[in-house]
Every structure is written in structure tokens, then in C-alpha cells.
Amino acid sequence: MGAVSLGIFCLITSELLPIGLLTPVGAALGVSDGTAGLMVTVPGLVAGLCAPLVTVGAARTDRRHVLCVLIALMAVANLAAAYAPDFTVVLAARVLVGVGVGGFWAIAGGLAVRLVPQHHAGRATALIFGGVPTASVLGVPAGTLLGELGGWRTAFAAVGVLGVLTAVALFLLLPALPPAGIVTFRELPALLRRNRGVRAGVIVTFLVVTGQFAAYTFVRPILRDVSGVDSGLVSTLLLGYGLAGVAGNFLAGPRDARRTLLTVSATLTAVLALIAVLPGAIAGTALLLVWGLVYGGVSVSLQRWMLEAAPPAAEAASSLMVAMFNFAIAAGALTGGLAVDGVSVPAAPLTGAALMLAAALTVAVATRRDADGEGDGGPSGGTPDHRPAASAPASDPLPEQNGRMGRNGHPA
């Protein structure tokens, strides 16, 4: 479990590392902040494409081997970026990062139920996704600090070395994880058509994550230009943001996914609107910490929503969520970049606030619809008719636990 969580940590750190380095990378390679934001947009788009492609393409391959290869690919990409002579080479390296992020996350998201007994699955999922906010706590701030002390190339190189170590840890510590079932390309759109809960989860993922990254990609310019925070304090504030995010992740882990996401999106609507207009370092710091705490519960809540919506098709549902999550990262970074370059820095968090409001309304409507009996009344938000024909009943264990796999992931 720790090795998988470390893998998530490395990948999210790699994907979000440019957020704390936009200004120095842009200055060194002669591009604007908005253009430098493509370092977040490009891997997001690629990860969105690769989440289902890797899930289906590697459907017959031991999951342990797939995860090791994807982490190694990420490591090579970051080492290449560290020695890149121009911005074009950096973007090419970021494509490889996207492949690793999309494939690893889609597969790792459903592994908790194969590595621990069923009654620990919720806490295990929270542990795996603890790598997401921990990347904000240690990864992005440490990368920002390394960039300030030794240059941005040093930060990329450090993540590459950590990726190599993580690949070794996964190879040594993970048990054999043969495929639990074959996922096909036909299954993915069928799951969207038949399962109302999965559809709603994908829409909420897009709105929340796009809103988040429209603002968070440009958190450094926001703190500098709106809040008046000294540039030297940004890494420290991002550390506080990440610590709050870790707390939010574990607070949200055992809670109802829909209620959590409704609270998150409503709260972030207010936080992002306020941080765009309230001047002062104290106000900016306070809002940033609340932002981190609340957003920390998003990844684990979205994953639980999808697993509850389609228990027999956990890997397929996870791949759809991860694909949309990463498309949304790209869409948010691009939207925020257009807002910053075309209007002003405060336009980025205001755009994020509008999207968060739309997410809150979507969650409320989906929840109310189920309460009124239009769904199945459960967390999945879909009726039995909306499950794939070959699915097991929602109350049954996942296929890999139904006699095929032991409690520690080994063949029974």
C-alpha cells in the first residue's frame, strides 16, 4: 500500500511541479506565464487519453509490471526535462509524464480492494490517494524550494531520481497482480450509457477539477499580484496548503462521497471568489489554507463515488474518472492561462469559482434525483438496468475477491 501511495505521490508531484516553477521556467526559456502553463495542460490532456488506453491495452498484463514501467517512464521524462535546451523539449517530456499519470492512476485507484480485506477498502483507498495531497505538502513545495535554491532544472532532476527509487520499491514490494478481468473499449462507453451514477460522477469530476486548476495553476501569480505575498514565501504557503490537503483527504475518506463533494464545491466557490478580490497577505494566507483543506477531500471522494457507482466494474469506472480528471486539469490550466493572458490574474480564480458553483448544483441535482426515487436510492445513482449485463450484483464482492484472489493480492 505504501509503495502504491508513493507512486501516486511521485506522479502527482511530477504533474503539478511546474505550478511552483512557472515564473522561473518561463523566464529561463523565454515564454510567458500563460504559455508556461502548458507544462500542466499537456500532461493533463495526455493522461486523460492514456487512462482508458493503458487500462485496455494492458488488460492482460500483470498490474505490478504495468505500474513499474509507468513510474520508470515518468522518471525518464523528468530527467529529460532537467536537461532540456528549450521549451519544446520540456513539453515533449511532459507528454511522457502524462502517459505515466493516466495509466498508473487508472489502475492504482482500484487496487485497494485487492491488497487489503474488503472491510478495510475505504481506509486503504484513502491511504493510496493520500499521495495526492502529500504531493502538495512535500512535492510541489519542495520542488519550488529546490527551484529557488538550485534552479528549476534541479527540481525536475530530483523528481526523476525519486521516480527511479519508486519503481524499485514497487517491483520489490508489490505482490503479483494478474488482471482481475479484461476491460474492453466497448465496455467504457457502455458503462457511461447504462450507469447514471457514473455519468454524474464524470460530470462532477470535470467541473470540480477544471475549476480547481483554472485557479491553482496560477496560485503563485495570484498570491503575488492580488494578496501581495512576497515571492520568497510562496513555497512556505504551498507547504501549508498541502498539509491542510492531507488532513482534508483523511477527513473525507470515510465520509459520504456526495455530501463531501457538495460541501467541497460550495465552499470553494466562496474561497476562490474571495481570493480573487481580497487584498492583503493575511487574507490570502487564510483563504489558501481553507482552500487546501477543502480540496484535499476531492480525489478520494471522486474515487469512492465511482467505485460505489459501479462495484463490479471498478477498473473501468476508475479509468473514466481518471481520464476526465486529467482532461479537466488540462482544461483548467488552459482556461486559467487564457484568463490570465487575456484579462488579468484575478480572472483565473473567478473562473474557478463559477465552475465550482456549477459543480455544487450538479451534485445537488443528482442527489435530489436519487432521493426522489429516480435512481436506485443508493450511492451509485443508477438502476439495476443501468449496470452492464455481465456485472455481478452490487452487493457482491468485486470479481477479484470472489475466489480468484487472496486477501493480499496473491492467487487464492
Image (spheres, helix red, strand yellow):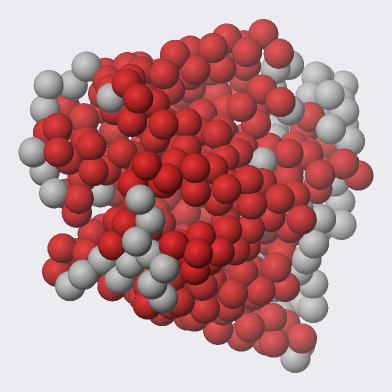
The quadrant of the picture occupied by the C terminus is top right
Q: Seen from this angle, which residue lies furthest bottom? A: 372
Q: Is residue 346 visible?
A: yes
Q: Residue at x 38, y 64 (%)?
A: 227
Q: Position of residue 70 (x, y in %)?
A: 46, 24
Image check: 121 left or right of 78? right
11 or 271: nearer the viewer: 271
Q: Is residue 45 visible?
A: no
Q: Position of residue 35 (x, y in %)?
A: 16, 49
Image check: 13 left or right of 315? left
Q: Give the answer, above or below, for where 13 lies relative to 323.
A: above
Q: Position of residue 305 (x, y in %)?
A: 68, 61
Q: Residue at x 69, y 81 (%)?
A: 367
Q: Give the answer, above or below, for where 72 lies relative to 35.
A: above
280 or 133: nearer the viewer: 280
Q: In the rendered picture of this protein, how many numbered marks are placed on residues?
A: 0
Q: Seen from this angle, which residue lies furthest left? A: 30
Q: Residue at x 11, y 27 (%)?
A: 86
Q: Residue at x 84, y 24 (%)?
A: 408
Q: Position of residue 337 (x, y in %)?
A: 23, 59
110 or 155: nearer the viewer: 155
Q: Give the answer, above or below, for where 369 lies relative to 201.
A: below
The quadrant of the picture occupied by the N terminus is top right
Image check: 346 left or right of 233? left
